[in-house]
Amino acid sequence: MAFDIEMIKSVYARMADRIDSARKVVGKPLTLSEKILYNHLWEGIPRSGFKRGKDYVDFGPDRIACQDATAQMALLQFMQAGKEKVAVPTTVHCDHLIQAKEGAAIDLKHANDVSSEVFNFLESVSNKYGIGFWKPGAGIIHQVVLENYAFPGGMMIGTDSHTVNAGGLGMLAIGVGGADAVDVMAGMAWELKFPKLIGVKLTGKLSGWTAPKDVILKVAEILTVKGGTGAIVEYFGPGATAMSCTGKGTICNMGAEIGATTSTFGYDASMERYLRSTERADIAEAANEVKEYLTADAEVYENPDAYFDQVIEINLSELGPLLNGPFTPDLSTEVGSDMTQKAKDNDWPIKVEWGLIGSCTNSSYEDLSRAASIAQQALDKGLKTKAEFGINPGSEQVRYTAERDGILQVFEKLDAKIFTNACGPCIGQWARYNDPKNAPKNSIVHSFNRNFAKRADGNPNTHAFVASPELTAAIAIAGRLDFNPLTDSLINENGEKVMLEEPSGWELPPKGFEVKENGYLEPLEDGSGVNVAVNETSQRLQMLTPFVPLGEAIMGAKLLIKAYGKCTTDHISMAGPWLRFRGHLDNIANNTLIGAVNAFNKKTNFVKNQLDGSYGGVPDVQRKYKEAGIKTIVVGDHNYGEGSSREHAAMQPRHLGVAAVIVKSFARIHETNLKKQGMLGLTFANEGDYDLIQEDDIFNFVDLDKFSPGKQLTLEIIHSDKSVDMIKLNHTYNHGQIEWYKEGSALNLIKKENA
Ligand code: F3S
């Protein structure tokens, strides 16, 4: 199963050449982030430096990880590429599709019943194409990656935003959309805008009730949910090296909550301890030999302002435990400050109903042991917990070891529910209510990363607060948001006043990690004989058929929708209940653009069917055009397609027969996704031309036969009164991308090149 030590050694072997050359071309000492980026350039030895925040650069990541919800479409696409095996080590992790309700045993069985079709599909595709497969119950993708695959100085991509967690082990690990992952699986480069760099210097030392989680909650308070956008956050200083590796993982994990591209730490003794403890001593030894390349050049940390775009300093000795929320992870309240007043002013329920410990953010052995030290005190001091407890261990290895060491039993004695080693409540897979929309107002505390409305339980009235696992345990015991364990006492069952002492725990299990059945399936060496079966009547999965090229003459196209204002990938392909159709393109296409506002009537999902003048839902009307063999266009405003990088937002319109998306400006990832699916993604040369587009217009692309890089296209617009406008459209297609268009999609081209 394991990590590929030869691959890791080859990454280390090229460091001296590439990084020393990079230092020369950049002309100054390098941060750790730059070292990793330059060591993973697709072009090999860097010939020039790159402008941060400006240049788009091709990289060659070392690994790919996919979770079950996003892997479905990624693998369905990869199957189109005509490859025998993935080009880069890849794993699939079944963690998102398991609902938390009764506890691990019952819940896992239920998930295996209701989603067996999806799990079997993922397993057989993995087996066929050389992909490592982690079964449902094996653990949460990012904990499993940290325990098994992450390595200092590596670069990985993953089809999940919290892939960034692997920065705890000194990687640059970045969340991407499925289409990007498919490119890398198929042996192509991966493009990223060269990030800006934020340095966070940690001085002092964590102690008492303060945990690594509080560091990132503080950073979120300082930078806010947007402050890390387009940047890598690099942590350094004595406070960083004094922290455990899994604690560093927590900090990197929640880098996603400040919008950061990723976060990382330099290689240090805590990482070496973690590697050895997770039976990867050979990686530790290989890393020790190239140590100087696994951290920044000394000058960088001595004078960080000269090398980072922004520097933040936090003294951990002065940092207190924080409680962030509700509804946003950057709203901080220091424990012991003014929570009582804040809750009153904002009408937040002070009573806490649940304390949830786990998620990819905080489910390590250290996390569970520190939280259990608080839970044990409740037992010892005769305290009854006021809130309910739910625990999601991060992996079977953590769970098994924690059970062996009596940690889980402590929680069980407090009537905690031990849920499956999976995402559970963190992704809304929590059967807390029968009717969440009408559930009562309440507060919960958890050690997860996201606390947006409805995220955990679907109830818009649940106020979710984020804290460290140990503080979550204390607040669940006290049952109050404003409980300050440093100063407040509690009344036990004998009516006595007792206080909770500060948490204690183990960075790593003193008796080592242990696991009986880790849930991993190694793929066949030769998977060519594996048959991937998808039932034709399946509602969850559908094999893809290659898109047909749109051709050089798009004439007589109709307008599907002129979107008004913001149109994100959520407006184009909604999440929520549609998640279950992520592997079935035709079914999920029934949500296409249903969130977009029609510029002509300011309504959502209500557009004119020009064939008969009636009005209907966007997907329904589009299907009518498709039936009639008529191509359509979508018109949009600025930053069209912002938000998540989900490829469904491009694949669905393509599947339904939309030929072109013409907007004032694109979010770049979505623009690229449209190109990959063989569509036209174009911008108005004159923004004001957006206003020319009328509901009944007919569109002719008159010079598409001359489609070439840097050359505008001309669109003829015939209005219903027979008047005509000729407008110019810009595009950013290069030669290769025009080939994608001509072949019908990037995958069609890959397949052709493989044939
Ligand atoms: Fe899963 Fe929540 Fe992490 S959904 S991957 S535990 S952010």
Image (spheres, rainbow, N blue to C red):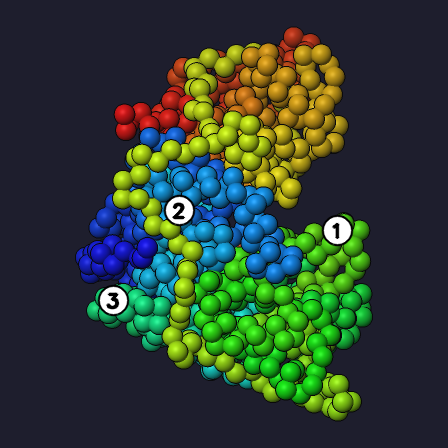
The residues tagged by marks 1 and 3 sit, at their Cα atoms, a distance apart of: 50 Å
> Residue 192: which disc?
2
Amino acid type shown at disc 3: Asp
Quadrant including the C terminus: top left
Q: Which mark is residue 282?
A: 3
Please tell me which residue lies in front, 322 or 535: 535
Question: Badge 2: how crowded within 10 Å, few (<14), some, or many (20+)?
Answer: some
Q: Position of residue 538 (x, y in %)?
A: 55, 31
N-term-proximal mark, 2 vs 1: 2
Answer above or below: position of 167 versus 175: below
Residue beneath the point at 36% across and 64% down? 170
Tell me the tag on residue 434.
1
Q: Secondary structure at mark 3?
A: helix
| Residue 283 in view of the camera | yes
Residue 22 at what x, y percent from top left?
25, 56
Residue extending furthest top?
Answer: 722
Q: Compared with residue 705, is residue 663 higher up or lower down, i.e. above or below?
A: below
Which of the two discs, 2 and 3, labels the residue nearer the N terminus? 2
Specify few, some or many for label 3: CA neighbours under 10 Å numbering under 14, 14-19, or 20 or more.
few
Name the residue type under label 1: Asn
* Picture quadrant of residue 348: bottom right
Q: Nearer the viewer, residue 509 or 185?
A: 509
| Place of residue 432 in the rendered image (x, y in percent of width and height, measured from the top left) | 70, 56
State yes or no: Cβ of the residue under disc 3 lies below 8 Å from any atom of ligand 1. Answer: no
